[in-house]
Amino acid sequence: MKQVLEAEYNEERVIRAAQAGDREAFASLYEAHVDRVYHYLLRRMGQPADAEDVTAEVFIRAMKALKSFEFRGAPFVAWLLRIAHNTAVNHMKKQSRRQEVPLLDNLPGVNDPAELALNQVASEDVSRAMRGLTALQRQVITLRYMAQLSIAETAAKMERTEGAIKFLQHSAIRALQRTMGRQEASNVDG
């Protein structure tokens, strides 16, 4: 596979290698097309976090369906964009039907008033940061950390694959870190 990547990029050979189970070949396809798929989804969905979530789902689906891909003259990226379109439509349908799991407002009882005040401030900061997440990201964080469900239980509850849940959790945590960092910076500056 390394020879294929070092030589002139021949997508058909890379696809055939990926279809045969070569993970490096699939990684090469991912790298070659992830930006185009993401930007297509961003234009359709408008929200970067939603586009990230659906992009991950697109490549999970593409990996599972890759053996069925046939060369018919259309570029490989067209096949990926068709998967992206269908996945985005499904995502938007689920979003409109899905009920969000409410956040728990109260933390377990604490007797120390200072500790209670600190927990309240932290809870408010997290709640404020959570508003910047997509509905799916909020649901993953709520189920994983507040309801303390496993990846498998969360996947079953959200009707998603475990891989999709792991990606959603990772992107949600990254988004929370960015938001919380901005909140801390504004508190120090202000």
Image (cartoon, rainbow, N blue to C red):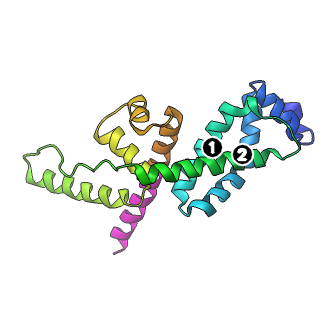
Residue 135 on image: x %, y % = 41, 53
Going by the numbered disc 1, the residue's amino acid type is Val
Under circle 2, the secondary element is: helix
What's the magenta bit mostly, secondary-structure-wise? helix
- Horizontal side, residue 4 vs residue 122: left or right: right
Who's the residue at 37% across and 64% down the image? 183
Going by the numbered disc 2, the residue's amino acid type is Leu
Q: Residue furthest top?
A: 20
Residue 1 on image: x %, y % = 83, 29
Q: Residue furthest bottom?
A: 190
Check disc 2: other Cα within 10 Å, few if <14, some if 14-19, many if 20+. Answer: some
Residue to which mark 1 is pinned:
58
Q: Which quadrant is home to the C terminus?
A: bottom left
Who's the residue at 68% across and 38% down the image? 62
- Horizontal side, residue 92 vs residue 74: left or right: left
How many angstroms separate mark 1 from mark 2 (CA)?
7 Å
Disc number for residue 9 = none
- Magenta-span inclusion, residue 184: yes
C-beta proximity under 8 Å, tags 1 and 2: yes
Who's the residue at 49% across and 51% down the image? 93
6 vs 34, nearest the viewer: 34
Check disc 1: other Cα within 10 Å, few if <14, some if 14-19, many if 20+. Answer: many
- Magenta-span inclusion, residue 15: no
Who's the residue at 82% across and 35% down the image? 70
Residue to which mark 2 is pinned:
80
| Residue stretch rendered in magenta on the structure | 174-190
Under circle 1, the secondary element is: helix
